[in-house]
Every structure is written in C-alpha cells, then in structure tokens.
Image: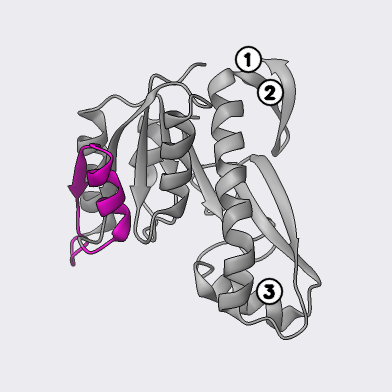
Amino acid sequence: MGCRSLAFLVSGNGTNLQAVMDAIEAGELHGSIAVVISDRPEAHALRRAYAGGIPTAVIERGHEPIEEYTAAVVRELKKYDPDLIVMAGFMRILGREFVSEFPKKIINTHPALLPCFGGRGFYGAMVHRAVISSGARFSGCTVHFVTEAVDAGPIIMQRIVPVEDGDTPETLADRLRPVENRTLVDAVKLVCSGAYSIRGNRVVRGQEGHQ
C-alpha cells in the first residue's frame, strides 16, 4: 500500500498521535501526518500537532444531523487526500459516508480486546470500568479497520495487559497506554506495508494485497 500521508481524528490527550509522530521522526515509519482533526478545540492532541508543525482543524459537533457532521469531516479530509486515516481516541461515531468515501483506509484504536467491551457506549474510562466489573483477569487494546458497524471491522493487531487486584479505570488505563501506543505504531507499519490479507474478520500478516 505505502503511506505517503496520514490523517488523524482525535478528541483527547493524543498519546497515540505522539507515538506515531515519534516513530516518523525516528525513521521507523515513513511518510508524514498531513492533518490532525478534532471535535474538541481544547484537545491536547491539537497542541501536540501544533508543536510538530502539523496542520490542524477543529470540527465541533452541534445539533446538526450526523450526516451533516460526517460530510464536514469528509470534506476536510479530502483536502489532504490521506493514504490512511487513524481514529485515535476520536469520540464521535460518524455516518456511512465516512466509510464509503475511504474504503479500507480507516483504522481505529480501542482500549479493550474486541469483540468484548466494544460497540456504542464503550469508550474511554467506561471501557475500563466495564472490564474491571466483569471480573476479567486480562484486558488489552485492539487496532482494527473501520466499517459501518461500530468496533466490528477486521482486527489488525491486539495486545494484552493484566487486570490487577485493586485496579481502577485510571490505573488500568495507565498500564495499557504505552502498550496501545506501541501497538498502533506497529499496526500502521503493517497496514502501510501492504503485506497482509483479510481473512474473515482478522488481518493475516505476510500476504501481499487485500482481500
């Protein structure tokens, strides 16, 4: 595939964005980040992008229909013609046009081991709270392709972290964060290499081309 340019959709602190920025700076990932788009003007991720000289855009969600909001995001992305779009902590679910305009070019990070603890309503601390409440002894992160179904696209990569006695959503999130950062970098590298195939609902490495 090759990725000359990436685009990021963000809502929060931007540690995943920073991990990819650092990997590009170190020469581990080739290409550049063309734009960082946020739905929140106060998102710290925008400051990270600004510090790195990356163009930014803020598209806040008001009371307009989701189709109108999605169209605004799509218009902004098309200005930059990215090879890959990374949803990294973006807290908005976009409409069908988003996926149809960029087929197999959108990936998302999720702070749990999908298909568990995913779908509408599972984001941020809510995910970690649900994992702890379930009694699960392990959690982790998932990077997957985005499809119209929420958190249901083909899984590119997953990594596991333990859930320890006495964990809170905050301590579990802190333990997972560096693992998620590393996993996203590795997933971007794999997708951009094109050396994979999609079988069922998972990505298989070492096969050239898409299925």
> Is residue 81 in view from this perspective?
yes
Please rate how many residues cluster around mark 1, counting C-alpha atoms within 10 Å: few if below 14, some from 14 to 19, many from 20: few
Residue at the disc numbered 1: 209
Structural distance between the alpha carbons of marks 1 and 3 = 35 Å
Q: x, y (%) of residue 188? A: 54, 33
Q: Which one is in front, 18 or 5?
A: 18
Residue occupying image coordinates x 64% and y 55%: 141
Residue 142 higher or lower than 112, as above or below: above
The answer to whether the residue labelled 1 contacts the one labelled 2, judged by CB atoms less than 8 Å apart, is: yes
Which numbered dot is residue 197?
Answer: 2
Report the span colored magenta.
42-64
Please rate how many residues cluster around mark 3, counting C-alpha atoms within 10 Å: few if below 14, some from 14 to 19, many from 20: many
Please rate how many residues cluster around mark 2, counting C-alpha atoms within 10 Å: few if below 14, some from 14 to 19, many from 20: some
Residue at the disc numbered 3: 131
Q: How is the image coloured?
A: one colour
Residue occupying image coordinates x 40% and y 34%: 100
Horizontal arrangement in the rendering, residue 106 relative to residue 139 (left or right): left
Residue occupying image coordinates x 43% and y 40%: 86
Q: Is residue 152 magenta?
A: no
Q: Is residue 55 magenta?
A: yes
* SS at mark 2 in the image: strand
